[in-house]
Amino acid sequence: MTVEEEVAWRALVVDDDVPLLKAHARALVKAGYQVTTALDGTAAVRALDGSEFNVILSDIDMPGMDGIKLLESVRERDLDVPVVFITGKPSVESAAKAMEYGALRYLVKPVGLQELVKVAGDAVRLHRLAKAKRGVLNLAGGSERLVGDLAGLVARFGSALESLYLAYQPIVSCEKRSVFGYEALLRSREPTLPHPGALIDAAEQLGKLHELGRTIRGRATEAIDALPDDVLMFLNLHPADLDDDELFNPHSRLAAVADRVVLEITERASLRKVPNVRAKVGALRALGYRIAIDDLGAGYAGLESFALLEPDVVKLDMSLIRNLDREPIKRTLVRTMVAMCDELGILVTAEGIETAAERDEVAEAGCHLMQGYWFARPGDAFPVPRFDDH
């Protein structure tokens, strides 16, 4: 895909195979990139010290500094630029190590030139999104995990599970004036664990995240039959839920309605501790689930969540939406993120809309879906949203 920008995107191509290096460089130049080449990792680092790049495509097996060491040097200089590894000696070990260290893709030689250009184009789009996300973090700051009191935690957690219930908030299409879905929100009547963060923290400390996740999914399944057939259920997952075999059980009650469920995975927790994330997300999609990234802009900067989850939906965090009508920097960031998601075919939901002005700015920015107190507060199944100003 040709790079359609006034200033060409910059690519660094690294390979000790001279004919292949030249072929890859020519293909990218033809597609509109400004290309810098390097025959080894050391030369690539010198190039990095003198320029910024939008994508790096590198061999893994090179004399001296190999691709993994190069990636470490890249991250010392640039936290966001995507690195694509290309190897003629594929192995499970090298692929695993590449992903562990943060490579965006792992390609096996020979790579078709058309595929190479497409992968580079996808990487550039993700790089733009990553930079926008880092801008959001600079505005909103990082998230804090709440830590509860340990005294009597086991007893309180048991009580919280028994009194656990779900509140539902509509996700709407203002353009169609219709409900697209409902998000199931965790609630408990246990007074010492009064909010979702405290309950999740308790589950983490007690090693009971799977028990909590199964309870939540069970409650959601009980309610989903009451939804109209064309309305989806958005259900939050903790990354640890991806290690729970029950989630992948094709005979579970939730799997039976998987085509009506969007699984939200928050950006506020890293996915790097979850093994085989891509394969697990693929298995969930095979069952019929759709995947969403929640809290976009409030979690980790960089490409991790997008690269691992390849989401169908992203939800912009409410910290980015708050006072959007009065803060030009936020408006620019939202528009940039929506544009990048449009290019990747991802639906964008704006969370936390509380005023008509925020609603109008979100619509003007091109967000596909909206959610927040302005439409309806969370409640028993299922609150009817308002669409008019009165």
Image (cartoon, rainbow, N blue to C red):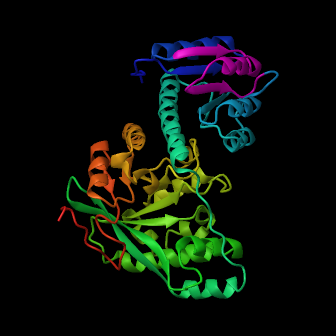
- Decide whether residue 324 is among the magenta residues: no
Q: Position of residue 133 (x, y in %)?
A: 51, 43
Judge from the rendering whether residue 228 lies leftward or rightward of residue 263; answer left or right: left
Residue at image location 37% in from the left, 38% down from the top: 339
Q: Is residue 312 visible?
A: no
Residue nearer the viewer, 267 or 311: 267
Q: Position of residue 168 (x, y in %)?
A: 37, 73
Judge from the rendering whether residue 231 lies leftward or rightward of residue 189; answer left or right: left
Q: Residue furthest front?
A: 326
Quarter occupied by the N terminus: top left
Residue nearer the viewer, 246 or 170: 170
Residue 200, quarter of picture? bottom right
Q: Position of residue 231 (x, y in %)?
A: 30, 65
Q: Is residue 75 visible?
A: yes
Q: What segment carries the magenta color?
A: 34-62
Q: Position of residue 369 (x, y in %)?
A: 32, 54
Residue nearer the viewer, 218 or 35: 35
Residue nearer the viewer, 269 or 387: 387
Residue at image location 60% in from the left, 23% down from the top: 52
Judge from the rendering whether residue 321 lies leftward or rightward of residue 265; answer left or right: left
Quarter occupied by the C terminus: bottom left
376 in relation to 45, above or below: below
191 in relation to 256, above or below: below
- Decide whether residue 56 is among the magenta residues: yes
Numbered marks: total: 0
Residue 25, quarter of picture? top right
Residue at image location 50% in from the left, 30% down from the top: 124
